[in-house]
Amino acid sequence: MAIGKWIGSALGWILGGGVLGAVAGFCIGTMLDEAIEDKKHKGPDDDAGNGGQSYYEQSTFGGRRPFEEDRNSFLFSMLVLSSYIIKADGRIMHSEMEFVRQFLRHNFGPQAVSQGEDILLKLFELQKQQGPYQFKETIRKSCIEISFHMNISQRLQLLNYLVIIAKVDGIVSPEEVTALKEVAHYLGLSAQDVESMLNLENGAKDSSNIEEAYKVLGISPSATDEEVKAAYRKMALKHHPDRVSALGEDVRKAAEKKFQEINDAKERIFKARGL
């Protein structure tokens, strides 16, 4: 099996050890072994078009784009945490899995779809092996490692993907909300960050319920004008898309969409207050 570029390329700090390194070993060790074995069975002319290097060698050791390791580590972290959110309500929904497939296909190519899905299935298997309490501890320790290596804006974008996965089937169960808030806490974020993201689309667009716009900014309708402005400035600083640009253009575009929804919610509040 030829290994996908995002897996073939080193996963940065994740492969340096710790809980995430152990999880990565459980999930992709077989894939890497098969890729190396596939390379051994190639003839000397098989890689002629690659200047004598196999695709595995090029992807892992040379020709990497800037920040590719951080990008791939972000993706693997997303898959690990997604496995926790997807199974939070005890079910694996087709719509949630399809969101992950589309994300992989759009950003990493068709080969990454089957491999990313295989990783998710292995994570579900690990969750079954460990049981809910031990796997929850695995998630907690993984989040601590993620927090050490990602800035707050990158962690917020990671959380935003998890919220989207929970929302994609049209219903966010209480179990999913609890799991999202647990992950947010482990990542050094807040329950309010989760509430804000859960209300993003409605708070930006639904003119019939301005309270949801206030939820996006994390304030109550009774807040003063100065408190509203301060809350927006804080949100804008944390969620600015430039702060996740190192993770790739696709991640930046997703952050831009979120940033625009925050701005839209702010504009609705400002308009209602005559600011």
Image (cartoon, grey):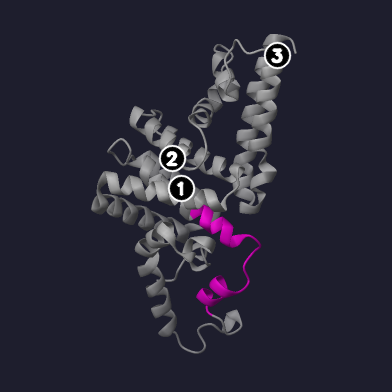
State the quadrant of the N terminus.
bottom left
User: Would residue 24 be found to the left or right of residue 65 on screen?
Assistant: left
Q: Is residue 128 magenta?
A: no
Q: Are marks 1 and 2 in contact (CB under 8 Å)?
A: yes
Region rendered in magenta: 54-75
Q: Amino acid at mark 3?
A: Asp
Residue 30, placed above or below residue 271: below
The picture quadrant where one finds residue 172 is top left
The residue at which mark 1 appears reads as 143
In the rendered view, would you say 230 is above or below 50? above
- What amino acid type is highlighted by mark number 1? Cys
Secondary structure character of the magenta stretch overall: helix
Work out how far the residue at label 1 is from the one at label 2, CA to CA, in angstroms.
Answer: 7 Å
Task: Say what secondary structure mark 3 lies in.
Answer: helix
Residue of label 3: 225
Side (left or right) of 239 relative to 34? right
Mark toward the start of the polypeptide (3 vs 1): 1
Q: Earlier in the sequence, mark 3 or mark 2?
A: 2
| Picture coordinates of residue 60, whole percent (x, y) | 54, 72
Task: Tell me what residue is drawn at x 58 percent, y 80 percent.
Answer: 49
Query: Which residue is label 2 attached to?
Result: 183
- Secondary structure under the numbered disc 1 in the rendered image: helix
